[in-house]
Image: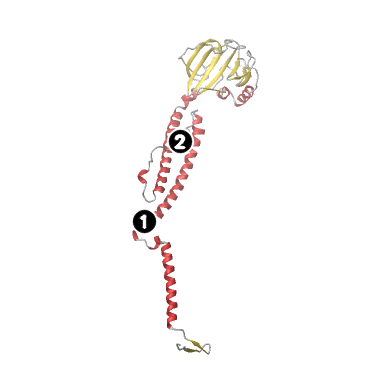
C-alpha cells in the first residue's frame, strides 16, 4: 500500500492529504483532450472560414459583394419598372387617347422571350443564376424602353400634325340647328317608324324641310355619293382619315362626287326623304375604325356647354326614329 502524505493547511488549521502527481497529470490530459476535440468540431463545422487560402478568402469577399450589389441593382430596376409602368399608363390612356390611336398591347410592350437560352454562355460560372437573372431583367427593361420610345415618336408626329388632324375630326352638326329643335332621334334603341319594331338606331336624325343644306362635318374625301339599296336612299359617305368616317342619309340631292375632297362646313347635299324614311330628315352616323359610334360626342365646335348638355339629354330619349 502506497504511503499517504499529508500537509498542514495554515488557513484551515488542519492537515489535508496530498494528491498524487499521476492523477493530476491525467486530469490535465483529459481537459486538454476535451478542448482539442471541441476545437476540431468547430473547425470542421465551418471549414470555409478556417481552411481557406488567401485567394479563396478574396473570392468569398467578392461573392458577398456581388450579392450585395445585385440586391441594390434589383431595387433600382424595380424603381425603373414602376416608372415605366406609369409612363405606359399615361401613354395608353392619355397621349394615345387624345389622338384617337389604339393603345399598345401588353404583349408587345413586355417584349417576351422564347426559343433558345439567350444566356447559355453564363452557365457553369460562379453565381451564374444570379447573373442570368440580372441580365434577363436588364434586357427586359431595355426592350420595354425601346417600345415606349417608338410610341413617343408616333405621338410626337401626331402632335406636330394636330392642327391638320383636328380639321379631319367630325366636330359640327350636319344641318344648321342653333335652336336645337331639329334633332328628332338619337343613338340607341328606338322604334322603327315603318317596321314598327324596336331596333338599334346607329345615328342621329335631324328633321328639316326638303332642300335644307347638309354640311360635311370635317375635312375628308368622298367615298360614296348617290343612291344605294341599303335604306339610306341618296346618301354621302366621307372618309376623314385617322379612322373616322361619316354618313349622311336620305338626301333629296347630292352635290359632291366620289373621290372629291371636301372641307368642314361645305355643302354636300340637301335634306330629302329618299330610301327607307318616314319624313324629310338627315340621318347622320359617325364611324371610328369601322365601328358606328354615338355622334353626340362630336359637336364640340358649334355648341356651347349648355347647349351640348341639352342636346345630349334630348338624344337619350327613347322615342321613334325617322328611319
* Colour scheme of the picture: secondary structure
- The label number, if any, that marks residue 59 in the structure image: 1
Instruction: Say above or below: 4 vs 320.
Output: below
60 horizontally vs 274: left or right: left
317 horizontally vs 65: left or right: right
Contact between labelled residues 2 and 1, with CB atoms less than 8 Å apart: no
Residue 179 placed where, x, y %? Answer: 62, 19
Residue 184 placed where, x, y %? Answer: 63, 17
Q: Classify mark 1: helix, strand or loop.
A: helix
User: Closer to the camera, 217 or 133?
Assistant: 133
Q: Classify mark 2: helix, strand or loop.
A: helix
Instruction: Say above or below: 64 vs 78.
Output: below
- Whichever of labels 1 and 2 marks the residue nearer the N terminus, that label is 1
Furthest residue to the front? Answer: 1
Residue 212 placed where, x, y %? Answer: 57, 12
Gap in angstroms between the C-alphas marked 1 and 2: 39 Å
Q: Quadrant of the C terminus?
A: top right
Q: Quadrant of the N terminus?
A: bottom left
How many numbered discs sit on the rendered protein?
Answer: 2
Residue located beneath label 2 in the image: 109
Label 1 neighbour load within 10 Å: few <14, some 14-19, many 20+: few
Name the image quarter holding residue 41: bottom left
User: Closer to the camera, 7 or 78?
Assistant: 7
Label 2 neighbour load within 10 Å: few <14, some 14-19, many 20+: some
Name the image quarter holding residue 173: top right
Name the image quarter holding residue 182: top right
Measuring 44% from the left and 31% from the top, which residue is drawn there?
A: 154
Amino acid at each position: 500500500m502506497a504511503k499517504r502524505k499529508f500537509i498542514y493547511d495554515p488557513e484551515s488549521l488542519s492537515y489535508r492529504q496530498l494528491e498524487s502527481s499521476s492523477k493530476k497529470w491525467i486530469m490535465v490530459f483529459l481537459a486538454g483532450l476535451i478542448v482539442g476535440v471541441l476545437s476540431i468540431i468547430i473547425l470542421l463545422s465551418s471549414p470555409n472560414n478556417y481552411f481557406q487560402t488567401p485567394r479563396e478568402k478574396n473570392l468569398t469577399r467578392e461573392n458577398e459583394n456581388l450579392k450585395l450589389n445585385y440586391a441594390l441593382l434589383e431595387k433600382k430596376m424595380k424603381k425603373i419598372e414602376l416608372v415605366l409602368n406609369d409612363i405606359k399608363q399615361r401613354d395608353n390612356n392619355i397621349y394615345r387617347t387624345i389622338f384617337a390611336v389604339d393603345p399598345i398591347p401588353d404583349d408587345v410592350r413586355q417584349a417576351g422571350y422564347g426559343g433558345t437560352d439567350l444566356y447559355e454562355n453564363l452557365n457553369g460560372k460562379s453565381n451564374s443564376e444570379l447573373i442570368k437573372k440580372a441580365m434577363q431583367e436588364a434586357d427586359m427593361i431595355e426592350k420595354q424602353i425601346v417600345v415606349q420610345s417608338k410610341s413617343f415618336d408616333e405621338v410626337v408626329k401626331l402632335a406636330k400634325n394636330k392642327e391638320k388632324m383636328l380639321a379631319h375630326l367630325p366636330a359640327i352638326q350636319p344641318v344648321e340647328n342653333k335652336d336645337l329643335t331639329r334633332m328628332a332621334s338619337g343613338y340607341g334603341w328606338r322604334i322603327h317608324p315603318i317596321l314598327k319594331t324596336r331596333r338599334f338606331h346607329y345615328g342621329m336624325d335631324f328633321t328639316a324641310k326638303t332642300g335644307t343644306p347638309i354640311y360635311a362635318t370635317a375635312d375628308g374625301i368622298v367615298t360614296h355619293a348617290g343612291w344605294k339599296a341599303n335604306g339610306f336612299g341618296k346618301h354621302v359617305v366621307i372618309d376623314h382619315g385617322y379612322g373616322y368616317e361619316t354618313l349622311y342619309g336620305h338626301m333629296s340631292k347630292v352635290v359632291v362626287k366620289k373621290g372629291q375632297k371636301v372641307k368642314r362646313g361645305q355643302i354636300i347635299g340637301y335634306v330629302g326623304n329618299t330610301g327607307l324614311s318616314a319624313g324629310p330628315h338627315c340621318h347622320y352616323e359617325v364611324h371610328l375604325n369601322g365601328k358606328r359610334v354615338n355622334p353626340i360626342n362630336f359637336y364640340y365646335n358649334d355648341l356651347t356647354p349648355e347647349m351640348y348638355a341639352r342636346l345630349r339629354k334630348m338624344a337619350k330619349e327613347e322615342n321613334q326614329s325617322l328611319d
